[in-house]
Image (cartoon, helix red, strand yellow):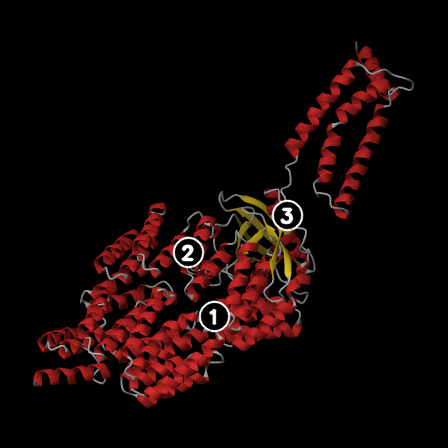
């Protein structure tokens, strides 16, 4: 039996050799290899899909059974005849090949398309490669962990994440945000106790990435084996939390290693969605599009950290200058300089940095170029052209939430385009699946349009979708406050407080309502408690700002000034220098003037002017106008206003229109042109009601209405003035200056008794007012006049 089996095996082996099956199959496999190589070459050389070689390989491998069958039937020398079995197997093998292609090859999606738009700078049509709708891949990246044990390499924790993100951003299919590009991400990590924004747990990173509506999340680490560094990045699916892949790279050239990591990460992301590689943008290495100078890159990272962690713009600029000394072609350094100089208020330097960045635009990714161009036009005072650049940005990147957010914000800021802003935020809502940012933004636009019902409706939907969040309740409370419905606001603040433990915003809202309902001292004590409870400096300053406002409204200006000094000190860690100067400097000068310390006030003002660079030093003319008006220096006030108007002709900042109109109305009042003054007052109030500032500081429109009431009183229309003042007092019962004007209007209208009653209400508010507070001194004089009659 064994001999028979051996004989059969020998006969089978001999039969295979006789039919030349090994030779034929070997030649076929070689032909498969050659065909795949040719297919790869064709993909590189001609306009042939990159998956062409995959199809060639799978199809040819699938035909091995048919080749074997045909070799068995026709491999012997001599003429052979086709059998029915051989003919029938051909369609069977075709089906096998089709099944193999369907199972092993997923068709590559052409995820990009070409779009042609007008370039605002050159006037030329420019072709862009953009992601098709719905195919943009959103990524959140975090700083890496330095596990080398070498503290001198700590900068690489930030540098690795930054370089990989810069490389990925060159792909129009990928958008990535890091703690450097998103203050929300940075705060979310640091507020959990990770002060250097490294070492946080995976769960926190996934949670933050989910809040950003990201599909992917990247985190990494750096290790060291002898003298060799290894860069390792892990890619996670944010929805499932699953680890998709881990990629590591070790080369003596660190930039080459990081470029390798970025390339592999990008390929994995695109492969997961079967997206073809973009074809229009050149695939530059990190050393080509960033820099090949490690020291220059290190200085850039030092700069980013100085601003992101210390809010030190001057130091950040110094680091960038050192980076450019090492590599003057480092385009990203110029891009950062634009933002730093703008926040420092140095528009000329920002403009120069923009021009240098645009010369190197071939090194920048598409979205960065749009940002640079928009900034260039903005610092040059060409707001309309800046808006057009942002509009092109959303056309090129219609799936970019950042682009729609920027456009919506700019529509809101420039005024008179609230409907366009609403459209932008509705689009943002579609991208975020009606996420919080979009719904809150929509509600705020409705508030500016005076549509309380629609604002509450949008926020109510937000609350229904996210019943566990306090944010919609807080936004509703602020909406009710804007429209003077204090009790409804209190209910929402209370609900938010119950929903979220130790919610500073909710507790602060309740403290404000407490003051509005007459419990001023209790409100101040509560605010002091909240300062101690605050988890961050930003929260402390938020509470202190409300405390300072309350102290001002109740006439305690010395205490208010102390709070301003404290806010100024604390805000240095996060507020840009220009914002600090304009915000806190103006308050200090105003309070000194109210306290009748004119010489010191103007000394402070001169210091502000000396520390403010062009063109923002011209904004101080508007402040100077207000200060002169407080002192009754009408000619000086008019001159300062005229200088500011000339400045605004160059820089289109419509947010200041409300103040210009109100100031012009006051000038007309002084000239006795009351009808024209009232017309300008109404325009100013209308302008203010659609200004983004109204959402931040409700007292702005109250002040404009107060000025209108003064004009009505000057014309002798006392009852109308009282109606206007009552509107303000209903919404803001703490605004004692309005009540002072109401008392004067009542007296001028012949009702001294009612005027004295209002004065008693004011005295309850100003029970602890500073003796040298100008308005308090004048009120006491007014009361003595009434009681002496």
Q: Position of residue 258 (x, y in %)?
A: 64, 57
Seen from the viewer's position, the closer of residues 298 and 519 is 519
> Contact, CB < 8 Å: mark 3 with mark 2?
no
Q: Visible in this render: residue 303?
A: no
Label 1 vs 2, first from the N-terminus:
1
Q: Which residue is mark 1?
A: 310
Q: Which residue is mark 2?
A: 422
Picture layout, residue 70 above or below residue 454: above
Residue 527 falls in image quadrant: bottom left
Determine the secondary structure under disc 1: helix
**Image position of 364 (left or right of 762):** right
Whole-angstrom CA distance, mark 3 to mark 1, is 36 Å
Q: Position of residue 245 (x, y in %)?
A: 59, 45
Q: Residue at x 77, y 38 (%)?
A: 36
Q: Position of residue 771 (x, y in %)?
A: 20, 84
Q: Which residue is mark 3?
A: 267
Determine the secondary structure under disc 2: helix
> Contact, CB < 8 Å: mark 1 with mark 2?
no
Label 3 vs 1, first from the N-terminus:
3
Whole-angstrom CA distance, mark 3 to mark 2, is 37 Å
The local crowd at label 1, few if under 14, some if 14 to 19, many if 20 or more residues have their Cα within 10 Å, is some
Seen from the viewer's position, the closer of residues 184 and 553 is 553
Seen from the viewer's position, the closer of residues 270 and 758 is 758
Q: Nearer the viewer, mark 3 or mark 2?
A: 2
Picture layout, residue 290 above or below residue 328: above
Determine the secondary structure under disc 3: helix
What numbered label is drawn on residue 202? Answer: none
């Amino acid at each position: 039996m064994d001999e028979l089996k051996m004989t059969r095996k020998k006969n089978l082996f001999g039969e295979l050799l006789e039919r030349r099956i090994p030779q034929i199959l070997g030649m076929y496999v070689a032909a498969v290899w050659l065909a795949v190589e040719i297919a790869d070459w064709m993909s590189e050389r001609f306009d042939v899909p990159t998956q062409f070689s995959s199809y060639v390989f799978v199809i040819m491998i699938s035909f091995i059974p048919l080749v074997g069958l045909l070799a068995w039937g026709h491999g012997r020398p001599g003429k052979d005849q086709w059998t029915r079995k051989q003919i029938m197997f051909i369609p069977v093998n075709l089906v096998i090949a089709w099944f193999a292609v369907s199972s092993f090859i997923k068709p590559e999606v052409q995820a990009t398309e070409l779009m042609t738009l007008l370039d605002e700078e050159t006037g030329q049509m420019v072709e862009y490669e953009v992601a098709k709708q719905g195919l943009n891949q959103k990524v959140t990246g975090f700083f890496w962990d330095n596990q080398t044990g070498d503290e001198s390499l700590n900068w690489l924790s930030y540098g690795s994440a930054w370089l990989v993100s810069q490389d990925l951003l060159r792909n129009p299919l990928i958008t990535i945000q890091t703690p450097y590009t998103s203050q929300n991400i940075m705060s979310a990590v640091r507020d959990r106790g990770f002060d250097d924004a490294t070492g946080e747990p995976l769960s926190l990173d996934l949670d933050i990435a989910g809040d950003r509506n990201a599909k992917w999340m990247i985190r990494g680490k750096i290790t060291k084996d002898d003298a060799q560094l290894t860069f390792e990045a892990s890619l996670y699916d944010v929805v499932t939390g699953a680890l998709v892949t881990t990629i590591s790279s070790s080369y003596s050239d660190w930039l080459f290693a990081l470029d390798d990591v970025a390339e592999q990460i990008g390929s994995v992301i695109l492969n997961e969605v079967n997206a073809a590689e973009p074809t229009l943008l050149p695939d530059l290495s990190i050393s080509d599009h960033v820099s090949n100078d490690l020291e220059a890159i290190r200085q850039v990272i030092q700069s980013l950290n100085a601003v992101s962690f210390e809010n030190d713009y001057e130091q950040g600029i110094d680091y960038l200058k050192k980076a450019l000394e090492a590599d003057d072609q480092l385009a990203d350094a110029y891009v950062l300089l634009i933002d730093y100089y703008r926040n420092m208020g140095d528009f000329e330097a920002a403009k120069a940095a923009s021009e240098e960045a645009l010369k190197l635009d071939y090194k920048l990714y598409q979205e960065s170029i749009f940002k640079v161009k928009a900034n260039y036009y903005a610092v040059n005072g060409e707001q309309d052209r800046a808006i057009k650049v942002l509009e092109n940005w959303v056309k090129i990147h219609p799936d970019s939430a950042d682009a729609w957010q920027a456009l919506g914000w700019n529509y809101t800021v420039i005024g008179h385009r609230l409907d366009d802003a609403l459209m932008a935020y509705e689009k943002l809502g579609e991208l975020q699946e009606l996420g919080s940012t979009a719904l809150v933004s929509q509600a705020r636009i409705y508030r500016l349009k005076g549509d309380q019902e629609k604002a509450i409706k949008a926020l109510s939907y937000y609350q229904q979708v996210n019943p566990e969040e306090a944010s919609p309740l807080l936004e509703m409370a602020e909406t009710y406050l804007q429209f003077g419905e204090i009790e409804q606001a209190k209910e929402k603040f209370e609900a938010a407080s119950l929903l979220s433990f130790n919610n500073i915003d909710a507790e602060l809202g309740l403290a404000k309502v407490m003051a509005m309902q007459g419990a001023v001292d209790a409100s101040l004590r509560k605010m002091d408690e909240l300062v101690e409870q605050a988890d961050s400096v930003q929260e402390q300053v938020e509470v202190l700002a409300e405390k300072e406002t309350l102290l001002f409204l109740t006439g305690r200006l010395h205490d208010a000034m102390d709070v301003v000094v404290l806010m100024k000190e604390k805000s240095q860690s996060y507020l840009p220098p220009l914002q600090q100067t304009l915000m806190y400097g103006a308050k200090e000068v105003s309070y000194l003037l109210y306290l009748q310390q004119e010489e010191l006030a103007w000394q402070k003002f001169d210091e502000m002017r000396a520390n403010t660079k062009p063109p923002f030093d011209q904004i101080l003319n508007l402040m100077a106008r207000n200060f002169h008006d407080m002192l009754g220096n009408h000619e000086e006030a008019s001159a300062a206003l005229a200088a500011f108007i000339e400045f605004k002709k160059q820089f289109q900042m419509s947010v200041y229109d409300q103040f210009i109109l109100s100031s012009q109305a006051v000038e007309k009042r002084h000239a006795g042109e009351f009808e024209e003054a009232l017309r300008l007052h109404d325009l100013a109030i209308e302008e203010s009601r659609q200004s983004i500032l109204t959402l931040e500081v409700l007292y702005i429109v109250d002040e404009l209405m107060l000025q209108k009431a003064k004009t009505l009183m000057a014309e002798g229309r006392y009852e109308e003035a009282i109606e206007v003042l009552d509107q303000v007092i209903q919404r803001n019962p703490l605004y004692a200056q309005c009540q002072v004007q109401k008392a004067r209007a009542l007296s001028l209208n012949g009702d001294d008794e009612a005027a004295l009653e209002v004065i008693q209400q004011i005295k309850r508010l100003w029970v602890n007012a500073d003796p040298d507070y100008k308005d308090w001194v004048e009120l006491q004089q007014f009361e003595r006049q009434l009681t002496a009659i």
